[in-house]
Image (cartoon, helix red, strand yellow):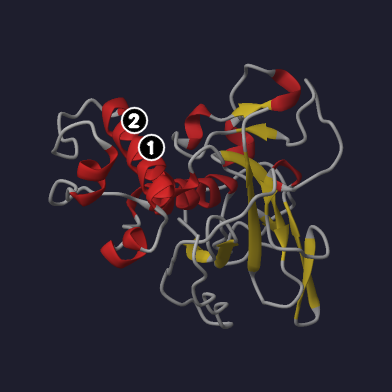
Amino acid sequence: MPSASRSRFPSTSPPQSSASLSSGNATSHSRSSSGSSLGHGPALIQLHYFLQKTQEVVAHDIRTYILWDIREHPRKAQTVSQLPLPIPSEVLNAYATNPPVAYINVTCEYPKPWSTVVHASGANQSGGFPQNRATAGVTVADLLGAIYNHARTHPVSTSEFNALLPKQQTRVLDAYEKRRKVVNTNQVIPGNSTASSRRNAAPPAGEGIKLVDTFLMHTMFAGLEVDLNNACTVNLSVKRPN
């Protein structure tokens, strides 16, 4: 895809969510970082291990602790070591980081740099890391839910779509149409089945192409890594299905 300006990393105060489109050819797409913990002033923040990116095979030749297609609600995510069991509620309700933080910036390099901010839900948490119940902190469920919601609701602008190559436009439209069919809607892009007419047709008002449609086949969660250069920031990796 044509290059575009890189999204700026969020500052230490929670910014607004942002996104833009880009290309990548690796099986797993992520920003390089130093591991699963980050310097946050004098403190050290560590990700819940269920969320961490790993190079080790956890089970069934899978290198993540959870099996999750980000097009689907996190409640459908499964525990890799106990397939096909879902993620236990005590893990979903656990704090995503130790110590807990009120917000987390999530960034991703695929298909182009984008970011979103996850805020603590304030729900009653239990399990996972030791925690101060008087402290509001982002939970595992908050983090996965924010990724899911941002990917499926963030719109792709006309200029971003037009910047794609014709072949890429066709693939994105295919992904869009498949997603709309999954949610049982009759709202599809008008026009006949030719690629040129579909590229020139506008999506239905209020719907349209979303960020997740541009992921094409790279829709599997591949783990998170903390960013040692930016406070309260984690980098999301995505990959093709095994």
Identify which amino acid the numbered label 1 is placed on. Answer: Ala
| Real-space CA distance between mark 1 and mark 2, rounded to the nearest whole angstrom | 5 Å
Residue topped by disc 1: 175
Q: Label 2 amino acid?
A: Lys
Q: Does 202 appear above or below 21?
A: above
On the picture, is 9 further left or further right than 119?
right
Crowd class of label 2 (few under 14; some 14 to 19; many from 20; radius 10 Å) = some
Residue 110 as seen in the image, left or right of residue 186? right
Q: Quadrant of residue 183?
A: top left
* Secondary structure category for the residue under label 2: helix
Whether residue 181 is situated above or below residue 197 in the rendered picture: above
Vertical placement of residue 11 versus 228, above or below: below
Quarter placement of the C terminus: top right
- Observer-nearest of 230 and 214: 214
Q: Is any atom of residue 201 visible in this view?
A: yes
Query: Residue 128's x, y, as percent?
Result: 71, 44
> In the drawing, does residue 200 fall left or right of residue 26?
left
Residue drawn 25% across the image and 44% down it:
196
Q: x, y (%) of residue 15?
A: 46, 77
On the image, numbered disc 2 is attached to which residue?
A: 178
Q: Nearer the viewer, residue 17 or 100?
A: 17
Residue plotted at (67% across, 18% down): 83
Task: Report the number of numbered marks.
Answer: 2
